[in-house]
Image (tube, rainbow, N blue to C red):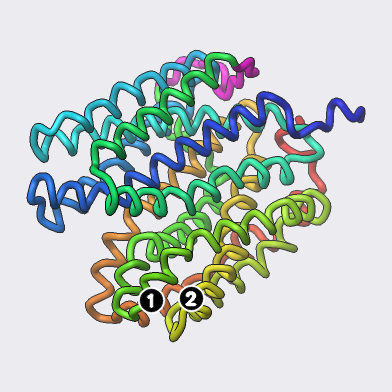
């Protein structure tokens, strides 16, 4: 294969990574501040604030379901990004709490559409022999946004006003729209030939991806307990200053590990990274449950980055490798639907557990779930990987 055909860092790949970074940054930035905004601006109760945070995920899920069976094209991406700009403007209309809920739903819908298109099309730009490495690099954009989004959101909520947060999101949306306008991207037709059977479950869900998607759901569920409750836990421990650097340390260790782990997956398969990653993630959560100093808190961040940071990107690569070429879009949508389910329902379910466990007990429970999932992974995918790797990669067929 020629060097040209094995290039990762093409203009299209960089542009798609940038769009993914800004969309994910907006999601985490808003998620870190919207509940506080609802409480301050509309005197929302904690349950109402939870609905306002969660309805974005519902919208995103709807967007992924609607987009999963469509032809992925520049036109769909442009449309999604354009409507994202319009729905972001709705945040500036301070009408009432119900209008805010509607705005969040519509905003999430557009994000789901755009991210599904980007996640599908980026696969088409990667050389077949470097899919794992390419997706690991692409996932760095998500990891960066995961760390920077909450950090920027909390800083702006403390040192600015909420309108400035929405103006920033609007600016980022405009940047994404301009990037997409100047892109040349391949059309990814991921639908099977129409046979007059009407809508079926297979139009929205790729069954082959379900085992690894279930693993991704469990991991994102556990990680949501960190996103949603770390600041409260740090306040209880009087470690707020150290906690402000938690996601920055997380981001740094993801950046360090991703290039190495992506190449290893291409050469040796997912298991060689996934099994240690479960151990790192579980150990990080267990350490978090017994934190006594800022040093141990940041060490937990590093372990969680080496764990969850790699599980998320590698499971995405696995899900894509399992799909037929015309089903890549549906496979991508399926994977992120389960990620969204974990992120969306995790905080509310975990919130019901906390009164019984406390925050330290919560992270012990989540750590044990992660370590138990290692066994679950073995039966769902790990033991089958050698057989699957002997088959031609679905994306190459």
* Left or right placement of residue 206 versus residue 379 in this view: left
Do we see residue 374 in this rendering? no
Disc nearest the viewer among 1 and 2: 1
Do we see residue 81 in this rendering? yes
Residue 148 point in image, percent of width and height: 47, 50
The residue that label 2 is drawn on is 297
Residue 49 point in image, percent of width and height: 18, 51
Quadrant for residue 254, please give it: bottom right
118 or 211, which lies in front?
A: 118
Q: Does residue 79 sit above or below 348 in this rendering? A: above
Quadrant of the frame with the N terminus: top right
The residue drawn where x is 49% and y is 32% is 116
Residue 176 point in image, percent of width and height: 48, 26
Q: Check whether the beta carbons of the residues at disc 1 and disc 2 lie within 8 A of each other.
A: yes
Q: Does residue 117 sit above or below 58 in this rendering? A: above
Residue 352, label in figure? none
The residue drawn where x is 15% and y is 56% is 47
Q: Cα distance, mark 1 to mark 2?
A: 8 Å
The residue drawn where x is 46% and y is 83% is 293
Q: Does the magenta-highlighted stretch encompass residue 188?
A: yes
Q: Does the magenta-highlighted stretch encompass residue 56?
A: no
Element assignment for label 1: loop
Quadrant of the frame with the C terminus: top right
Dot 1 alpha-carbon crowd within 10 angstroms: few under 14, some 14 to 19, many 20 or more: some
Element assignment for label 2: helix
Residue 239, label in figure? 1
* Sequence-first disc among 1 and 2: 1
Magenta portion: prevailing SS class: loop
Q: Which residues are magenta?
A: 183-198
């Amino acid at each position: 294969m020629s060097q040209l055909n094995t290039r990762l860092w093409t203009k299209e790949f960089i542009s798609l990574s940038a769009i993914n970074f800004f969309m994910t940054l907006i999601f985490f930035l808003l998620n870190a501040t919207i509940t506080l905004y609802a409480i301050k601006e509309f005197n929302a109760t904690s349950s109402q604030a939870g609905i306002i945070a969660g309805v974005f995920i519902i919208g995103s899920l709807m967007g992924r379901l609607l987009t999963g069976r469509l032809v992925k094209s520049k036109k769909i991406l442009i449309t999604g990004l354009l409507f994202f700009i319009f729905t972001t403007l709705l945040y500036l209309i301070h009408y009432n709490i119900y209008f805010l809920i509607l705005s969040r739903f519509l905003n999430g819908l557009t994000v789901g559409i755009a991210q599904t298109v980007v996640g599908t099309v980026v696969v088409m730009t990667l050389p077949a022999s470097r899919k794992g490495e390419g997706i690991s690099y692409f996932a760095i954009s998500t990891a960066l946004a995961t760390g920077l989004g909450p950090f920027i959101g909390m800083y702006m909520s403390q040192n600015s006003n909420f309108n400035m947060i929405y103006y920033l999101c609007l600016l980022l949306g405009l940047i994404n729209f301009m990037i997409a306008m100047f892109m040349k991207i391949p059309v990814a037709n991921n639908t099977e030939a129409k046979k007059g059977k009407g809508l079926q479950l297979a139009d929205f869900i790729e069954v082959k991806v379900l085992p690894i998607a279930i693993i991704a759901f469990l991991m994102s569920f556990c990680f949501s307990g960190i996103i949603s409750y770390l600041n409260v836990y740090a306040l209880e421990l009087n470690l707020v200053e150290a906690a402000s650097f938690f996601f920055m340390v997380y981001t740094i260790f993801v950046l360090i590990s991703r290039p190495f782990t992506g190449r290893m997956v291409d050469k040796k398969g997912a298991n060689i990274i996934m099994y240690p990653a479960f151990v790192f993630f579980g150990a990080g959560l267990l350490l978090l449950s017994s934190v006594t100093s800022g040093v141990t808190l940041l060490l937990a961040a590093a372990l969680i980055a080496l764990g969850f940071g790699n599980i998320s990107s590698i499971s995405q690569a696995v899900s894509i490798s399992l799909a037929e070429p015309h089903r890549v879009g549906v496979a991508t949508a399926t994977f992120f639907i389960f990620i969204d389910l974990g992120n969306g329902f995790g905080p509310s379910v975990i919130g019901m557990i906390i009164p019984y466990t406390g925050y330290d007990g919560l992270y012990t429970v989540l750590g044990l779930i992660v370590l138990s999932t290692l066994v679950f992974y073995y039966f769902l995918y790990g033991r089958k990987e050698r057989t699957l790797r002997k088959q031609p990669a679905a994306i190459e067929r």
